[in-house]
Image: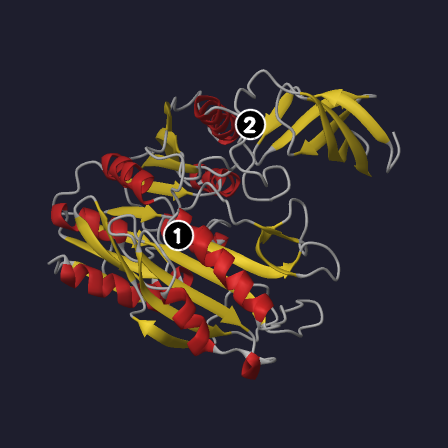
Amino acid sequence: MKKREIIEGVIKDYDFPNKGSFELDGKKVIVKGALPGQKVSCMVSKVRKDKAEARLLDVMERSEIEDAVPPCPQFGICGGCAYQTMSYEHQLELKAGQVKKLLDGVIDSEAHPYDWEGIIGSPVTTAYRNKMEYSFGDEYKDGPLVLGLHKKNSMYDIVPVCNCVIVSEDYNRIVSYTMEFARKHGLSYHKKMQHVGLLRHLVLRQSKTNGGLLVNLVTSTDGLENLDLHAYVEGLLALPLDGTIVGILHTANDSLADAVVPEKVTLLYGRDYIEEEVLGLHFQISPFSFFQTNTKSAERLYSKAREYAGDTKDKLIFDLYSGTGTIAQMLSPVASKVIGVEIVEEAVEAARENAKSNGLDNCEFIAGDVLKVIDTIEEKPDLIILDPPRDGINPKALLKIINYGVDEIVYISCKPTSLTRDLVTLQEHGYYVKKACAVDQFVNTGHVETIIGLRRTDS
């Protein structure tokens, strides 16, 4: 087997995230994006002693689990969705299998058998996202400006997505208008390698409670004098939308990172938040604060997390990586006090306002890095809730969390590979997994949430 050699095989095994594999010439060949049961043609990209990696070229024969027609015309080109050729039932089975396989690889189930509760599906499978981040660029080198999502397996090419099925039609209308506006006015897109050009991202949020929309246009300052923001706002407000635009912002970002960095944020119209309701609680969601992207499924996620937390009466709870304080406020009515820690100051301010509007006076929210902040908190928790970002928990912070010695920990993860890494450390330091389940927040994609209930061995 040689690099750039074109080979064929039938996918036998499947691992998170979205990696199929088959055996050839005594090597395991890993093909990202290939589904179990597919016969594929692929080009070898890396060769090692016992395995190889290959780039998917063609699906020669479909899998038995591919029993659906993709509803999106960009499927297979866009890097967003991966599972549109499968019915939702098969998507859930595939995700549950991936998570269970990962957990079984690290959990000491002989010493402490755990209760695997399977996967909880989303109540909505289309137009479910309440946030989307689009990028400006071109479909091909030196092509015309487009606005959309990254092309599959590409960091540079952008696919226009004006018919996306995982967002509401309002998103598609705003994306189409913004792209047409940019072309009409001859605006340039930001080239991230040369760091020249104006337009960078468009970030949209929409409330699933009342349809309110928040539009955030992100640009550099290179050529900003050519952007007529007043005309852009007028055009947005004239669009025929099902929901209502409640706020329009402009974010100036000259950061070298290919990310939405709020260096300077200007409110152009309305207010800088949308409103959402989850499990009877009211939340204001600001432009840069974290909130679960599937509101309806989030209710199922948080209900299960509350169940895993068990009896919280008279307990002091730490909600670490608390975002806008959803979990903290959900638990506060049945706890003595909840302390939330979140690094994004804007999210902390929103959490405080949300707690106030919900009439909760036993929630405290602290802005800062968990690694540093927990050294400054004098109270000791009885229960800890963890909901870290995709990369998991800083190893030093995890050891500090473990040193509290609480009897119960509930860990919510949006990336099961990061979770399993942290589970190894937690088990090495005296915790065992009681129960676990997956929750599908991201229909049609390869992403999945996982909830773990842990208990201290000597408790």
- The residue lying furthest to the bottom in this view is 225
Q: Earlier in the sequence, mark 2 or mark 1?
A: 2
Which residue is rendered at x = 12% and y = 43% of the image?
313
Q: Give percent across and percent down for residue 195.
A: 67, 73
Residue 264 visible in rendering: no
- Label 1 crowding class (10 Å Cα cut-off): few <14, some 14-19, many 20+? many
* Position of residue 423 measured from the top left corner of the image (x, y, whole percent): 46, 38
Residue at the extreme top of the image, as rendered: 64
Amino acid marked by disc 1: Asp
Task: Tell me the residue at 20%/43% (across/down).
Answer: 279
**Colour style of the rendered protein structure:** secondary structure
Image height of 209 relative to 203, above or below: above
Q: Nearer the viewer, residue 204 or 334?
A: 204
Helix, strand or loop under label 1: helix
Residue 226 visible to the viewer: yes
Amino acid tagged 2: Thr
From the viewer's side, name the closer residue of 97 and 84. Answer: 84
Q: Residues within 10 Å of mark 2 (few under 14, many from 20)?
A: many
Q: Which mark is residue 170?
A: 1
Q: Nearer the viewer, mark 2 or mark 1?
A: 1
Give the residue number, with chain letter if any, for mark 2.
85
Q: Nearer the viewer, residue 207 or 323?
A: 207
Quarter holding the N terminus is top right
Q: CA distance from mark 2 to mark 1?
A: 25 Å
At which x and y percent is residue 287?
Answer: 38, 64
